Image (cartoon, rainbow, N blue to C red):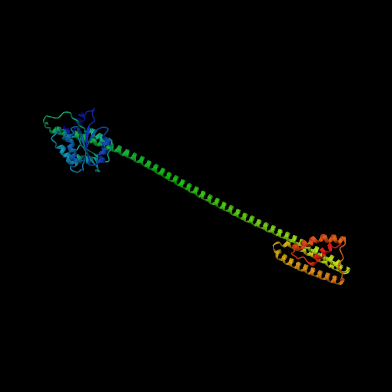
Amino acid sequence: MDMKTDPTASLQSTEATEKPTLLIVDDSRLMRHTLKKMLNDDFNLVEAVDGEDGWEKLLAEPRIEAVFSDLSMPNLDGYGLLERIRKAAEARINILPFIVITGKEGDDQSLLEEVRKHGANDFVSKPFKTDDIISKTRAFLTRSTETPTETPVEISDESVRLAAEEDARLIAEQAEAQRLAAEAEAQRLAEETARQAAEDEARRIAEQAEAQRLAAEAEAQRLAEETARQAAEEEAQRVAEQAEAQRLAAEAEAQRLAEDAARQAAEEEARLIAEQAEAQRLAAEAEAQRLAEDAARQAAEEEAQRVAEQAEAQRLAAEAEAQRLAEDAARQAAEEDARRIAEQAEAEARRQAAVTEARRQVEEAAQKAAIEPPPFTLLERFGVRVALPFIHISHVVLDIPSDEQYATLRKRLKRK
């Protein structure tokens, strides 16, 4: 049997105590990294970036026992490298298992026939399956420790037929194994797809739940902010209403205090007016008394009586007028000032008229009597002494200059 197609001989020559060495030829760093990650635990790996680099690595590294090679590469492609390997003079190289890395799609049997037509042992399809690669690698490994020195014997037609039958059986077994592996892979992929779909659905549901949670939190935050804003607005409105109520209360209190002050001022003014009226009344009474006494003493008894009656009438009128003024002042408060001045002027005019009239009557009585007034009696002297201070005070208060009657009274008091 040809050593290139006899996997049994290759497996028998593999040493169990040392990991086999494989050559990986691919211009893609990602593909090399993927194969290295899959095979690194079971094999020693040598990497090459294209066919030329792979050929140099084969010549330099005698421990290489199998080759994984891509087809499309710069400098020297996969089939070019395979051709060099199969035409190599060294038996170590030309019998190496060669496994094609392909990304073609199609029936496994047709792909296998295509790569074997070029001299390859098998193929692996992208994306890689770790179990598939390891099983195929172990099926074709060869690590012969003996270098053949004899010339190969001729192989009879019967041997070729038997070898072809053995190859066909091995191919059928490999095809069946590949089919079973493909079914298992399909089952795994289906389960993986279902699991991935379940995970995707669970992730989608979780994302939806998270989105709903975030939306609920955002809505809760918005409602909380809205509630806080409304509470702040209500609090501001309440504070404004309290401030307005306090302002109105302050204005009302100020108005009340102003009214109290105005009322107190009016009451004070009325009291002053009443006191002034009372003083005027007392002064008028004193003046009337003095005039009445003068008239009674200086004139005839009847004339003096008449003057006294008139003076008394004027006193009563003055008392009534003063009482009216006091009552009017208490009722009218702020408006009374102007009227009080007018009434005082009128009272003063009446008083002056009364004094003038009394003086005229006294003079007439004196002229009629044509005698000097007699001295006061003891009772009259006492009454005049009591009345003189009030007469003087009334003159000072009312700003009336002292007249001859006041001087006459003082002189008569001095007469014995």
Q: Quadrant of the C terminus?
A: bottom right
Residue sitting nearer the eye, 58 or 11: 58
Taking 411 as reference, is 340 left or right?
left
Residue 48 location, quadrant: top left
Q: Residue at x 46, y 45 (%)?
A: 217
Q: Which quadrant of the view contains residue 158?
A: top left
Among all residues in the image, which is located at the extreme top? 17
Left or right: residue 105 compared with residue 320 = left
Residue at the image point whose x is 87% and y is 60% from the top: 379
Which quadrant of the figure contains the N terminus?
top left
Q: Give the residue displayed 30% in from the left and 38% down from the top.
A: 185
Image quadrant where residue 133 sits:
top left
Where's residue 103, x and y in %? 24, 42
**Res 349 visible:** yes
* Above-or-below relation of 65 to 220: above
Question: Measured along the vertical axis of the image, is residue 109 above or below residue 354?
Answer: above
Residue 289 visible in this rendered orientation of the protein: no
Closer to the camera in the image, 221 or 414: 414
User: What percent of the width, then of the height, locates residue 348?
Assistant: 76, 67
Q: Which one is in front, 75 or 260?
A: 260
Tell me residue 218's x, y (percent).
46, 47
